[in-house]
Image (spheres, rainbow, N blue to C red):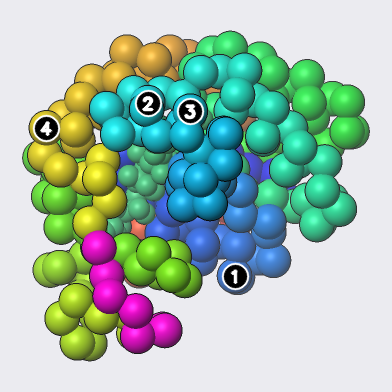
Amino acid sequence: MHLVLLGPPGAGKGTQAALLSRDLGLAHISTGDMLRGAVQEGTDLGLLAREYMDQGNLVPDDVVIGITKERLEAPDVQTGFVLDGFPRTVKQAEALDEILEDIGLPLDLVINIKVPQSELIRRMTGRRVCPKCGESYHLVFNPPRSLGTCDQCGHDLHQRDDDKETTVRQRLEVYERESGPLTDYYSDKGVLVSVDGTGTVEQVADRLKLTLK
Ligand code: AP5
């Protein structure tokens, strides 16, 4: 299966993509995770990306298209993928069409996860992540067993720089402006479905499973 998860920051794309990857054996491709990895490693890409990410803005199309193309050409993608956070602009969607045509893979479905803005802000400002293993928590909805410590590896948890409230609001504005047109783009192609992203993680996962059936 070859899927794209669309949805605003905090909609639960990363959470649901990880479950789909685990349950269906899909390669989970998150541009946000790839960019944060580059920031952590201090590479040239990371230094460039950080300038945009910390302000809540999109990293330039050409840069993100380049890293996604490279990832989509890896062998594990042949058995299926779930894209999380890409595409985010019409230019990226057009590039994805070209890449998939080149590597001979279809795009089966684009799932748009819908969540009201007030809930998105609550989810992002309460998120805590493990910088070591990447596990994600929420202070209220999915707390770690011991406050401030990762259940998986015991490392201290931290708040993403772009999860501070002013940056979150900027990310939501950018999403509306830059990514809003993607629903028309994929609806015109007949591959878009919308799924209610409210409720518990398990409830949303069940809706996604029903949709995929
Ligand atoms: P990225 O990491 O992709 O961030 P995002 O799209 O803004 O998405 P988030 O990770 O914030 O949210 P999500 O929908 O994955 O939700 P999650 O499951 O984590 O991108 C970061 C930055 O990188 C961008 O701002 C941009 O600068 C750059 N970038 C990335 N891709 C790019 C691209 N293609 N082009 C240009 N720039 C790009 O959940 C959020 C929280 O809610 C968690 O705490 C989680 O535990 C909780 N939660 C999840 N589901 C539920 C639920 N059902 N109920 C309660 N809580 C829940």
Q: Residue at x 66, y 15 (%)?
A: 94
Percent x, y of residue 135: 40, 69
The residues tagged by marks 1 and 2 sit, at their Cα atoms, a distance apart of 31 Å
- State which mark lies toward you, 3 or 2: 3
Judged by its main secondary structure, the magenta piece is loop
Q: Are marks 3 and 1 in contact (CB under 8 Å)?
A: no
Task: Name the residue beneath numbered marker 2.
Answer: 52
Q: Is residue 87 left or right of residue 205?
A: right
Task: Name the residue beneath numbered marker 4.
Answer: 166
The residues tagged by marks 2 and 4 sit, at their Cα atoms, a distance apart of 14 Å
At label 1, counting other C-alpha atoms closer than 10 Å, the crowd grade (few under 14, some 14-19, many 20 or more) is few
Q: Earlier in the sequence, mark 1 or mark 2?
A: 1
Magenta region = 152-158
In the displayed structure, 32 sits above or below 92; it is: below
The residues tagged by marks 3 and 2 sit, at their Cα atoms, a distance apart of 7 Å
Percent x, y of residue 39: 47, 44
- State which mark lies toward you, 2 or 4: 2
User: Label 1 is placed on what type of residue?
Assistant: Arg
Badge number at residue 22: 1
Q: Quadrant of ligand 1?
A: top left
Q: Assign a secondary structure to mark 1.
A: helix
User: Disc 3, ligand 1: is the CB inside 8 Å?
Assistant: no
In the displayed structure, 188 sits above or below 155; it is: above
- State which mark lies toward you, 3 or 1: 3
Q: Are marks 1 and 4 in contact (CB under 8 Å)?
A: no
- Quadrant of the rendered image containing residue 154: bottom left
Answer whether residue 153 is magenta in the image.
Answer: yes
Q: Residue at x 76, y 37 (%)?
A: 70
- State which mark lies toward you, 4 or 3: 3
Q: Earlier in the sequence, mark 1 or mark 4?
A: 1
- State which mark lies toward you, 1 or 2: 2
